[in-house]
Amino acid sequence: MENYIINSPDDFQEFDWEYEAKGCLEANITIFDNSYTFNFYDVRRIYNVTEANFGGGSCFYDKNLVLLSSVNLNNIKVFLNRIIEKNELTNFIKN
């Protein structure tokens, strides 16, 4: 049994390919009755975002930023299971 709920539209799994193509997704996830908003980026997308931001001499940051090899439901579940198993939830800010 999973210890989390990905709070997303019912058709989220049908459009998983869109998030993977876009390379980023902000998702609200409930873990052990606590709510977190994670900002998932794939490494190619984050490179483009940081290039655009650093070009102007600024910086890039995002609350609960998670880098994935590809933004898809499987990788998100792997990430969630890993932080739960390794008891790393304290590294993230609750909503």
Image (cartoon, rainbow, N blue to C red):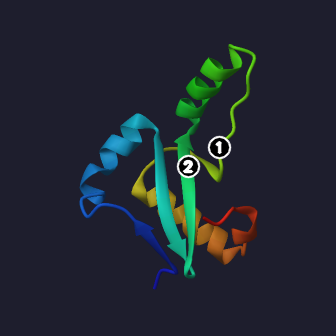
Tell which residue pokes out farthest to the bottom in this image.
1
| Residue at x 30%, y 57% (from the top left corner) | 12
Q: Is residue 88 left or right of residue 70?
A: right
Residue at the image point whose x is 47% and y is 56% from the top: 27
Does 90 appear above or below 18? below
Local SS, label 1:
loop
Callouts 1 and 2 close, C-beta under 8 Å: yes
Q: Position of residue 13 (x, y in %)?
A: 29, 58
Q: Is residue 78 left or right of residue 63?
A: left
Residue at figure coordinates x 69%, y 62% from the top left = 92
Q: Residues within 10 Å of mark 2 (few under 14, many from 20)?
A: some
Distance, label 1 to label 2, CA atoms, is 7 Å
Mark 1: give few (<14), some (14-19) or many (20+) Cα within 10 Å: few
Quadrant housing the C terminus: bottom right
Residue type, label 2: Asn
**Tag 2's secondary structure?**
strand
Mark 1 vs 2, N-terminal side: 2
**Vertical position of residue 67 compared to residue 76: above or below:** above
4 or 43, which is in the foreground?
4
Image location of residue 72, percent across then percent down: 42, 51
Above or below 59: residue 16: below
Q: Which residue is mark 1?
A: 62
Residue at mark 2: 39
On the rendered structure, is 75 left or right of 43?
A: left
| Of the pair 38 and 83, the residue shown nearer to us | 38
Q: What's under tag 1, amino acid-wise?
A: Asp
Please tell me which residue is depicted at 57% across the width and 64% down the height of the picture: 36
